[in-house]
Image (spheres, coloured by chain):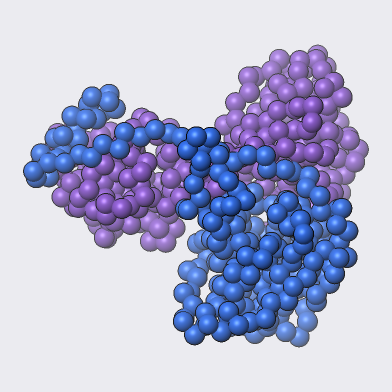
Chain colours: A purple, B blue
Amino acid sequence: MNGERVLCVSEEPDLAVALVHLARSIVGEGAGSVLAVVLPGSPSEVTERLAAGGADGIHVLEGAASSDPHVVAEALSALVSDLAPTLILMGSTKRGREIAGRLAGTLDLPATTGVTGLRLEADGIRVDREALSGNAVAVERIVRRPAIVAVMSGVAAPPAAPSASTERSSHPMPATVPLTDRMEGRPKAGGQLEIEKAERIVTIGRGLQKKEDLSIVEALAKALRAEVGCTRPLAAEAGWLTDDHWIGLTGHRVHPKLYVAIGVSGAVQHLVGMRSSRVVVAINKDPNAPIFAQADYRVTGDLYQVVPALTKALGG
Amino acid sequence: MAEKLRIWVAVKHGIDVGLARADRATGLVRVDSAPRKTSDFDKNAIEEAVRVREHHGGVVTAVSVGGPAAREALREAVAIGADEAILVTGEHWAEWDTRAVARLLAAATRKLGGFDLFLLGEGSTDHFAGLVGPRIAGELKCGDIAYARRLTIVPDGVVVERDLEKEVEVVHARYPVVVSVGQEINTPRLPTFMANLKASKKEVRVTGPSDLDVPADSLAPVVVIERVAVPEIPRKQQAITGANPDELAAHLRDALKEEGVLP
């Protein structure tokens, strides 16, 4: 595998460093080459972190930061021609997947996203990735190189030792005319809660009749010292809770000790967000709700009666 | 832009995730025989395409890459309001990966009249790679905007609000542009009985790699799905009951205490 040249790129500094660790663990200590790209607009300390993380080469793109996928893909495409990587690791963030697809289309390369595991094997690269809206794991084999693999954040690789010598070079951003213009960026409302870190979560779904009734759920959350989560309709449609509470495929993935799903039917896009919970309680008046198949403790009943009673039983 | 807005919408007839079952012994999902349906977010793309036409005029062309059953996704698109339906199919359709699908879609637009606005779901319900839209745009060298939550037609193109992890970004692009949409952009209408009936009689234009000048060997998969498994997380499935809510609540509290998950 000593001929491996892995190019790592992500707009998220932590993920960029994690990709370098992953690349190092794939090619081995002192073997192959781990190359990292620093995108314009990255914080200045990223270069040092990439070097400390085991990158053999750091390629800094210099010029104005661009949010246009075409401009970024053209810049990366020029680097791919120069550096001839055998594998391109990217972050499977929204921007990361977009750039991965654009670059793959520009250079006609194999690409895959949402990757949670990666192995170099004799007959190709094997990756594990989420499938069926996150409810299954697919194993894919990539049969042509170079290939683009976009990796989910949280894929652990042990921190690597710094490379014996890290070469640094800078490359000007190409003078590509953008195809899209960013007019505005608005930080999302809320966004303070880090629900992924919660030990206990009380999640409310469409069974809640009105926004004012959230207080019933909040009282239970308080008694359990839990965070309040919600399903897509409550965040994205009704706006009763901000997106940082949203659990599911396009929301957050959580893995608490205790997950209490209240008035949650259990759409597949929700289940992927909560299936790693240790103990699951489901409270729903519909005995056929799909959430019950994922529950350790099933309560068939009216949340407006059960939840206040449970709060009281817990001393709340 | 041509005189009439040319709107394309790509629809995938993918695995019905809600109905797909893993084999009990192996945990593997039989991908080839799993029930299929129109991918969820593609329905939002169809709805958005039809709304754009309703307000700004134009022609909506629905296109699907797949096997014979993909006609069902096209029928659904026509029932929601698409004007034309194109099925891109071939002997080896089941092997086509995201690269092959994107190449065929790009070739179809080139060969069959071009587009101003190309809509699709931001990911398919079964695969959710989010690659096809950006791949098409990369191949055709046109703009792409993914994760759209709101789309506005302006004189020279579109303004899109897109949902990123930490911000909502507002982006403008001239035509032609590929826009991928999420579930939040609209609520797809339920077609009427008459619309469904009419749609099932609509002629579907069938085309394939050779008609589209795509060499068959260039569609050989470069990413092969070897297996799809559902990790089995055993759940106790214990019903908690009680003569009244208080008794039930006490039983549940005791069970959770036993589990050691209470504060």
Above or below, B12 against A51 in this view is below
Of residues A64 and A177, which is closer to you in this image? A177
Image coords of residue B176 (percent x, y): 76, 70
* Residue A4: image location, x then y, percent: 83, 26
Can residue A63 be seen by looking at this rendering? no
Q: Quadrant of residue A314?
A: top left
Q: Quadrant of residue B243?
A: top left
User: What percent of the width, then of the height, locates residue B106?
Assistant: 79, 63
The residue at the point 27 percent across, 54 percent down is A286
The residue depicted at 64 percent of the width and 37 percent of the height is A139
Give the quadrant of the N terminus of chain B: bottom right
Relative horizontal placement of residue B196, taking residue A275 as reference (left or right): right
Instruction: Report the side of A276 relative to A133 (left or right).
Output: left
Q: Residue at the left extreme?
A: B243
Which of these two is toward me, A283 or B68? Answer: B68
Residue pushed farthest right? Answer: A82
Tell me if B219 is positioned left or right of A195 in this view: right
| Residue B190 coordinates in the image, percent (x, y) | 46, 74
Location of residue A49 with respect to B50 vertically, above or below: above
